Image (cartoon, rainbow, N blue to C red):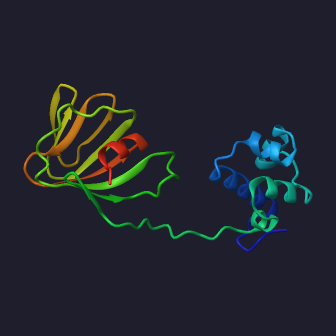
Amino acid sequence: MTDAPGEPVAERVRRRLRELRVERGLTLEVVANRAAIDVSTLSRLESGKRRLALDHLPVLAEALGVSADELLREPAREDPRVRGRPVIHDGLTRWSLTRHGPAGGLHAFKIRIDPGRRFPPDPLPVHEGHEWIYVLTGRMRLLLGDDDLTIEPGEAVEFSTWLPHWFGVIEEPVEMIAIFGAHGERVHLRD
């Protein structure tokens, strides 16, 4: 049996089983224990290597804290557009380009560095993570360890955040795209 978009019901249930488990932050082992089935059985059910039977639905749904209907139902389609208000902090205006979570812990932002952001803190911040920055307009000043770099429009930088770092402007405002891990977001973009 298939649903309207052409996806077989068994495939949809397998996909929903994995989606719901991951959304709730549950491991295969936790769900398998709750459902009183073997971990390898659950793994094979999710991957399609084992046939999904009707009697699996109630125990798996209960293990995930949902109804059996929720396992069978096609999830509502989300609006793919990312909307949010700009957030201003410490001379930075940011617009989120990703929802929090689905990008493997990475978050993308369009950032405008205001002309007043010219003086770095002492000491420069250091934290866990990695950052990627692409300058769209303006000339960005990047202090990275002992280096004082000017990043021009069209240039990209990538660096470990264990290196002391800070970014600001040379003269005019800077617009950039930045990708931060969760740690970089907390340090640079606190609300």
Name the residue at 71% across, 68% down.
74
Q: Determine which quarter of the picture holds residue 112.
A: bottom left
Q: Position of residue 24 (x, y in %)?
A: 65, 52
Name the residue at 15% across, 39% down.
120
Residue occupying the far top of the picture: 146
Residue occupying the far bottom of the picture: 4
Please give left or right for residue 16 compared with residue 105 in the image: right
Between 9 and 125, the residue placed more toward the observer is 125
Q: Position of residue 35 (x, y in %)?
A: 84, 48
Residue occupying the far left of the picture: 171
Name the residue at 49% across, 50% down.
103
Task: Tell me if I can see residue 191 in this picture.
Answer: yes
Task: Tell me if I can see residue 48 in this picture.
Answer: no
Q: Determine which quarter of the picture holds residue 68.
A: bottom right
Between 42 and 121, the residue placed more toward the observer is 121
Q: Position of residue 127 (x, y in %)?
A: 35, 33
The vertical placement of 155 against 165, above or below, is below
The vertical placement of 27 against 175, above or below, is above
> How many numbered markers are drawn?
0
Q: Position of residue 104 (x, y in %)?
A: 51, 45
Please give left or right for residue 172 compared with residue 166 in the image: left
* Image quarter hosting the C terminus: bottom left
* Image quarter hosting the N terminus: bottom right
Name the residue at 47% across, 54% down.
100
